[in-house]
């Protein structure tokens, strides 16, 4: 160690010894407080506040009693290393486009509307809360499920899984994966009756035996949307998520089921961590999911501007999951209806829901054809799609580190069109706060040589 370094070390020790140690904050930061508080910009290398907002009924707030001057201190190590697979979901539109075949390349640019101002935002670590056995026992008691927790038959030390209840899926069961966010899943196969199948003559081109199956008529009524919201809020509260019926959104409702969900809210922002459940006819609980985590604040950090964030989109390595509010279920349903009514290539018929007729096909049975895999249509050349980002909304994104742990980090949801899937997300932390892997080397697929029949 040089003399200059020794002198700096001595000055820091004297500064730390004379600095007043802050009094512990006596307030308790539970999930409700987390959802209401406003993030404050502060230097992450000063007092570190650890907010442990338990989702299983335990919460605490502590203050590390050390204040360190940042003068002369080198930049701190990254909080975590981002998982290399983060870029697999870079663009919601790309995921539904022909990028699967890598025939499309996206070129992003910033629109004039985007801000050039950076900012700051908090980072939260999502830590497993409790242990898998206690989580299973607690949730099972809420669902009236009996049994002892055990390692599942799919147990893997890298992704430990445990279950309780029916081991062969013939009855109600509950499972939890003890990594990431400690996600648990309840399933009751008896909620839906088995289809009734009968053997019939096989159509031409199909092998014997051939069966036709029909779902039996529902014997009960599914709960109304208001009833489902109220029931879900009670179950979510009992399994660790503090919500009201107004916070619960309806995913779907038909004669067979009604599905609802609610998201964990932190800093007044909906996150991608959701609790969900489905009711079958007769108000029978068919399935439910949730998480077992504590929310631990790691400090507030600077963020780049939306204009600068556009440059990160092409690499695909800065992606994170936004809350469910950015997924419009109404638009998804509208897209599904539009697909059902899409004209055929010859323009003479339309695809309609089962049981309806179109002009020219009254009383006709559609011909059955054996399943034949379709060869993908290969374009003549690589298509380049230019996307202009026109808006950016700041939010919290769920990001995964290389060890499989989950974090909440500042980011933007960036829109580049008015279409249902015209958006993508990007982490906005300044370089150095987290370690980002190099982009995966992805080469576009070479076009095949034309086949010449001899």
Image (cartoon, rainbow, N blue to C red):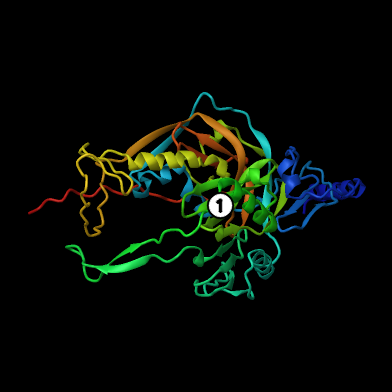
Q: Residue 23: horizontal and vertical position, in percent? A: 90, 48
Image quadrant occupied by the N terminus: bottom right
Q: In x, y percent, where is residue 212?
A: 30, 64
Q: Residue at x 36, y 66 (%)?
A: 196
Task: Report if residue 272 is visible in the image.
Answer: no
When asked about the image quadrant of residue 293, the answer is: bottom right
Of 57 and 330, nearer the camera is 330
Label 1: few (<14), some (14–19) or many (≥20) C-alpha neighbours in 10 Å: many
Residue 406 coordinates in the image, percent (x, y) = 61, 54
Q: Image height check: is 426 above or below 416?
A: below
Q: Residue at x 78, y 42 (%)?
A: 70
The one nearer the camera, 29 or 287, is 287
Q: Nearer the viewer, residue 141 or 215?
A: 215
Q: Which residue is mark 1?
A: 223
Q: Quadrant of the C terminus?
A: bottom left
Q: Is residue 129 left or right of residue 184?
A: right
Residue 21 position, x and y percent, is: 89, 48
């Amino acid at each position: 160690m040089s003399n200059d370094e020794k002198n700096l070390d001595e000055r820091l020790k004297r500064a730390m010894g004379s600095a007043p140690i802050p009094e512990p904050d006596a307030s308790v930061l539970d999930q409700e407080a987390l959802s209401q508080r406003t993030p404050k910009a502060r230097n992450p290398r000063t007092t570190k506040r650890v907010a442990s907002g338990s989702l299983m009924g335990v919460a605490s707030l502590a203050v590390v009693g050390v204040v360190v001057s940042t003068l002369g201190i080198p930049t701190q190590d990254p909080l975590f290393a981002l998982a290399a697979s983060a870029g697999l979901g870079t663009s919601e539109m790309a995921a539904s486009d022909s990028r699967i075949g890598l025939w499309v390349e996206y070129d992003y640019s910033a629109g004039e509307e985007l801000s050039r101002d950076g900012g700051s935002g908090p980072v939260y670590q999502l830590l497993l809360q409790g242990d898998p056995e206690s989580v299973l026992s607690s949730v099972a008691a809420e669902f009236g499920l009996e049994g002892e927790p055990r390692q599942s038959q799919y147990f893997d030390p890298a992704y430990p899984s445990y279950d309780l209840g029916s081991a062969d899926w013939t009855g109600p069961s509950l499972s939890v994966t003890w990594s990431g966010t400690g996600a648990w899943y309840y399933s009751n196969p008896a909620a839906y009756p088995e289809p009734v199948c009968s053997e019939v003559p096989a159509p031409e081109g199909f092998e014997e035996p051939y069966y036709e199956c029909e779902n039996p008529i529902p014997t009960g009524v599914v709960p109304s949307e208001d009833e489902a919201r109220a029931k879900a809020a009670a179950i979510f509260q009992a399994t660790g998520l503090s919500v009201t019926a107004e916070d619960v959104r309806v995913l779907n409702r038909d004669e067979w089921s009604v599905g609802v969900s609610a998201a964990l809210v932190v800093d007044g922002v909906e996150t991608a961590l959701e609790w969900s459940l489905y009711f079958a006819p007769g108000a029978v609980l068919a399935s439910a999911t949730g998480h077992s985590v504590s929310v631990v604040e790691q400090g507030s950090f600077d963020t780049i501007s939306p204009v600068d964030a556009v440059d990160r989109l092409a690499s695909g390595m800065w992606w994170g999951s936004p809350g469910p509010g950015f997924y419009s279920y109404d638009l998804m349903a509208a897209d599904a209806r539009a697909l059902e009514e899409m004209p055929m290539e010859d323009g003479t018929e339309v695809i309609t829901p089962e049981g309806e007729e179109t002009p020219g096909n009254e009383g006709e049975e559609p011909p059955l054809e054996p399943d034949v895999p379709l060869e993908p249509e290969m374009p003549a050349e690589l298509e380049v799609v230019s996307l202009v980002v026109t808006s950016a909304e700041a939010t919290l994104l769920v990001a995964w580190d290389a060890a499989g742990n989950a974090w909440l980090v500042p980011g933007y949801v960036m829109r580049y069109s008015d279409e249902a899937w015209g958006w993508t997300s990007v982490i906005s932390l300044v370089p150095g706060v987290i370690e980002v892997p190099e982009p995966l080397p992805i080469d576009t697929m070479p076009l095949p040589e034309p086949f010449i029949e001899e």
